[in-house]
Each structure stands twice: as structure tokens, then as C-alpha cells.
Image (cartoon, rainbow, N blue to C red):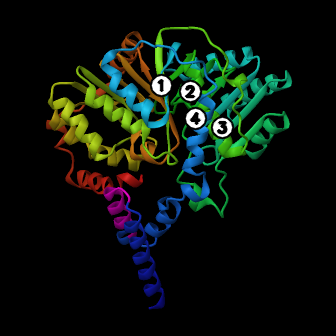
């Protein structure tokens, strides 16, 4: 009787706290359902993932704002940059939201194969002369991880400054010895919000999902590929299909700024020297904004940018994402775009590495189809690509999935690239992937077993928490 009473009081206390925090109503209801209808599991789930502890355990938003602006002050004096006028609203929005400048003179190369990305990355590391900054959600000690480590240690012995940030949860499979070898070679290596038993409930929910490399302040990498063999070898049941970008030019300064902010998080060392923001000429014609978001910012910058892009789209919206669990407002925006005649296409993976998330994602498909959105399920392997294209002239490439966790809780980074030629390349990639995808038809989708559809709808209730 005493145990039942204590449990009831605990549940009531959690419900009161969740309501009092004035969160998003949908997320509030989801947490209440989890705590009330999942005995004990719901409480544990809330203890680990549900508490908003960013103010207490990470860094103040005031300090974040200060750090955000200071490195960017070291950049070149802004000059007039030309971009498609149709995207003026997005550019202005992102500039005003979080001091995100438009950076021109970039050359961008897209990778859809892990081998190509890592071949170029290793070659760029070999040519580095001053510093290398690396931040990954997953840093594994497998074959490709060892190759990257060997290349970095060689450069460290040449006297280069090298700094590494790895997510301590995403990289949990890497052996401690592997990470210590970086440090022994003189490479500054830090975990992002290191997980310990005393801190797990306050930190597990806030992870750096970013994939950033900056070399000499001139060459940068951003996208969906971590450092792990699966990005090259795939699975026994199919390939790993992903998208990554190599940037050469001033856009790299945006990536550098994001990395140095995160470096302050993990090391309490403030780095803003001009040496990390060198004077750069023009390497290409791609203007871009490097947008970062996370629980420290007052606004969900990436989410706001995507919403504005959907609102402004006149011709087409192509989206590739491994997980499709967006906020309701974004669902409504996509449906409205399709209804007004925009060619909206959504590509998700037929098979996923997170089955529960995949099942919850399927609950959104019927509404998408009813509004006229074309939905494709990629069947050649696992589609992990996080790429979006709007009107053939705006391409988004970065770490953010199309879900609430990426938009609200993870630390993410996204390149908003305003260029028609690159947009055409990205669209060609999407169309090529359609060859290995099944177009979902409404008449077939509604015939699926009733219990399967019910379970998908049930999981959707918890979508904000997944």
C-alpha cells in the first residue's frame, strides 16, 4: 500500500511539474500519457529524457549569445552578396534570429557515397597546414576511425593544432584506449557533455548531433555522415545512403564559429583569434548561411528557416529524411504547399535502424497523401540522407532530421545554400534515388492491417518524445 501511494504521489508530482513548465502543449500531453500509462517505465523515461536542465547544466543563454557573436566579429568585413531574390525572406529571418550572416564565394561538392567523402577528407587532412577542428556525434574505433586517427596523429606530430569533440553517447562504442591515443599524441579531445551516472538524467537528452570538420579555416565538411564503417560498407541487407558536403570558402567561417562555441562548452576555453578566420578569396558562386540550433537558443533557428522555405516555395519541395516526426505546424505547412500546387515530395527509408521511430513516422503518411504530397520509400538500403531542396535554388544539407528532437533538443547544424546550379545537382540526386524507391499509393496504404495502423497511431502520441 505504501509503495502504491508513493508511486501515485510521484506520478502526480511529475504531472504538476510538466504542466507548470509551460512547454509545448503536445509535448506536455505526451509526457503525461507516458507517465500515467507506462507504469515505472514512464517515470524512468521522464527522469532520463524529460527534464529541461539546459540552464543549470550546460551554459546560460546569455553566455551563448555572447559567444555566438564574438567569433563572427573576427570575420571579413561584410560585402554585398547576390542570391536568388525569392529567398530574401529566409536570409533576413536567419540573420535576425541568431546573427547568422550570409557568406559568399563558396565552392560546394556533394557526396552520396561514404567512400568518396572519406577519401576527400583524408586527402584534405593530409594537406592541412595550421589547424584541424572535428566534431562528430559518432566517432568509432573501427577501420575508417583508425584511418582518420592515424592521419590526425601524423599531422599533430607535424605541429598542427588539432581539436576533437565527440558525443559521449553517440560514440559510446569507441574504446577508451582509442580516445586516449588522440590525447597522448597532443590532440585536444573532449566529450560533449560527458555522461556519468550522476549526470546521465541531466545530459543524456542533450546531444551534439553535429558533423563538422574545419581545416585551416578554409575547407569544411557538413552533412549526415559520422565516422563509422557503416557509412562506407552499409549493412548485410543494403547500402547506407547518405549526403555530405565539402565546402571551400567563407561558409567555412560559419562552421568554425559553431565549433568554437561548442569548444567553449566542453573545455571552458574561449578561442576567437583571427588566425581561425583567415582572409579568403572567392572559390565559387554559392552563397550560404550556416545555421545552428539547440536547446540553448531562444528560437529553433533551423526549424524556423525550414518553415519559411516551405511558405515561400512556389514550384517544388523535395525532402529526404531518415525520420519523419515533425511538429504539427510543419505538417500543415507541407500540406498547404501541396494543396496550392507545389510539387512536394517526401522520401523516407523503407527499413530503419530505429523501428519504433519508423512506425511512428508512418502514421503521418496518410495525411500527406490526402493533401497531394508524393511519398517515396527508399528500398535499396537505409536512407540516412538529410537533404532538402526548394524551388531548385535553395538546398539544405546538414545534421538535422525532420523531427522534433532535431528541431528542439539536439545540437544541430545546417547549411542553407542559395544557388541554382547546386540545386539542380541536389534535385538530380533525389530523382536518381527515386529509381530505388517505391511510390506510396493511397489505395494500397489504407489496406494495411488495422492493428498495424493502430499501433503506428499509438506511437504517434509519443512522437515529441522519440
Question: Which of the 4 quarters of the picture holds residue 310?
Answer: top left
Q: Position of residue 362 (x, y in %)?
A: 29, 44
Q: Mark 1 or mark 3: which comes first in sequence?
A: 3
Task: Name the mark nearer the viewer: 4 or 1.
Answer: 4
Residue under circle 4? 69
Q: CA distance from mark 4 to mark 1?
A: 15 Å
Residue extending furthest toward the bottom? 1
Residue under circle 3? 140
Q: CA distance from mark 1 to mark 3?
A: 29 Å
Residue under circle 2? 254
Q: Is residue 126 left or right of residue 409?
A: right
Residue sitting at 61 percent across and 39 percent down?
Answer: 67
SS class of the residue under badge 1?
A: strand
Residue under circle 1? 289
- Bounds of the magenta segment: 23-35
Residue sitting at 66 percent across and 28 percent down?
Answer: 144
Q: Mark 4 or mark 1: which comes first in sequence?
A: 4
SS class of the residue under badge 2?
A: helix
Q: Is residue 23 visible?
A: yes
Task: Say if the magenta span includes residue 25.
Answer: yes
Task: Name the mark nearer the viewer: 3 or 4.
Answer: 4
Residue sitting at 74 percent across and 39 percent down?
Answer: 189
Q: Does the magenta stretch mainly form a helix, a strand or a loop?
A: helix
Q: Is residue 448 above or below residue 428?
A: below
Q: Is residue 203 above or below residue 415?
A: below
Amino acid at each position: 500500500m505504501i509503495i502504491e501511494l508513493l508511486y501515485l504521489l510521484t506520478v502526480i508530482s511529475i504531472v504538476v511539474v510538466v504542466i507548470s513548465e509551460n512547454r509545448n502543449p503536445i509535448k506536455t500531453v505526451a509526457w503525461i500519457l507516458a507517465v500515467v500509462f507506462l507504469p515505472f517505465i514512464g517515470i524512468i523515461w521522464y527522469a532520463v529524457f524529460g527534464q529541461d536542465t539546459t540552464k543549470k547544466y550546460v551554459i546560460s543563454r546569455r553566455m551563448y549569445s555572447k559567444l555566438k557573436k564574438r567569433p563572427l566579429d573576427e570575420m571579413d568585413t561584410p560585402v554585398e552578396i547576390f542570391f536568388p531574390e525569392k529567398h530574401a525572406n529566409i536570409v533576413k529571418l536567419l540573420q535576425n534570429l541568431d546573427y547568422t550572416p550570409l557568406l559568399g564565394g563558396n565552392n560546394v561538392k556533394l557526396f552520396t557515397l561514404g567512400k568518396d567523402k572519406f577519401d576527400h577528407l583524408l586527402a584534405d587532412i593530409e594537406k592541412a597546414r595550421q589547424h584541424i577542428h572535428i566534431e562528430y556525434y559518432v566517432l568509432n574505433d573501427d577501420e575508417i576511425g583508425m584511418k582518420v586517427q592515424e592521419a590526425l596523429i601524423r599531422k599533430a606530430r607535424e605541429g598542427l593544432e588539432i581539436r576533437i569533440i565527440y558525443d559521449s553517447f553517440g560514440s559510446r562504442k569507441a574504446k577508451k584506449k582509442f580516445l586516449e591515443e588522440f590525447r597522448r599524441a597532443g590532440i585536444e579531445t573532449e566529450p560533449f557533455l560527458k555522461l556519468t551516472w550522476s549526470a546521465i538524467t541531466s545530459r543524456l537528452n542533450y546531444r551534439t548531433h553535429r558533423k563538422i570538420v574545419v581545416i585551416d579555416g578554409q575547407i569544411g565538411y557538413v552533412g549526415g555522415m559520422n565516422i563509422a564503417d557503416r557509412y562506407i560498407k552499409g549493412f548485410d541487407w543494403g547500402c547506407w545512403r547518405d549526403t555530405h558536403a565539402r565546402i571551400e570558402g567563407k561558409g567555412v567561417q560559419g562552421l568554425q564559429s559553431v565549433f568554437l562555441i561548442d569548444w567553449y562548452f566542453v573545455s571552458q576555453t574561449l578561442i576567437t583569434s583571427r588566425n581561425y578566420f583567415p582572409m579568403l578569396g572567392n572559390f565559387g558562386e554559392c552563397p550560404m548561411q550556416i545555421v545552428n540550433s539547440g536547446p540553448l537558443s531562444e528560437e529553433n533557428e533551423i526549424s524556423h528557416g525550414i518553415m519559411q522555405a516551405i511558405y515561400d516555395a512556389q514550384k517544388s519541395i523535395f525532402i529526404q529524411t531518415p525520420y519523419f516526426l515533425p511538429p504539427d505546424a510543419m505538417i500543415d505547412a507541407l500540406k498547404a504547399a501541396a494543396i496550392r500546387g507545389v510539387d512536394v515530395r517526401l522520401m523516407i527509408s523503407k527499413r530503419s535502424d530505429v523501428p519504433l521511430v519508423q512506425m511512428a513516422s508512418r502514421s503521418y503518411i496518410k495525411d500527406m497523401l490526402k493533401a497531394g504530397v508524393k511519398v517515396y520509400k527508399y528500398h535499396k538500403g537505409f536512407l540516412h540522407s538529410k537533404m532538402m531542396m526548394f524551388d531548385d535554388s535553395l538546398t539544405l544539407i546538414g545534421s538535422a532530421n525532420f523531427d522534433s528532437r532535431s528541431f528542439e533538443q539536439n545540437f544541430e547544424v545546417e547549411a542553407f545554400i542559395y544557388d541554382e546550379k547546386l540545386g539542380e545537382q541536389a534535385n538530380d540526386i533525389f530523382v536518381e534515388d527515386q529509381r530505388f524507391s517505391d511510390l506510396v499509393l493511397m489505395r494500397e496504404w489504407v489496406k494495411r492491417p488495422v492493428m498495424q495502423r493502430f499501433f503506428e497511431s499509438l506511437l504517434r502520441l509519443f512522437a515529441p518524445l522519440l
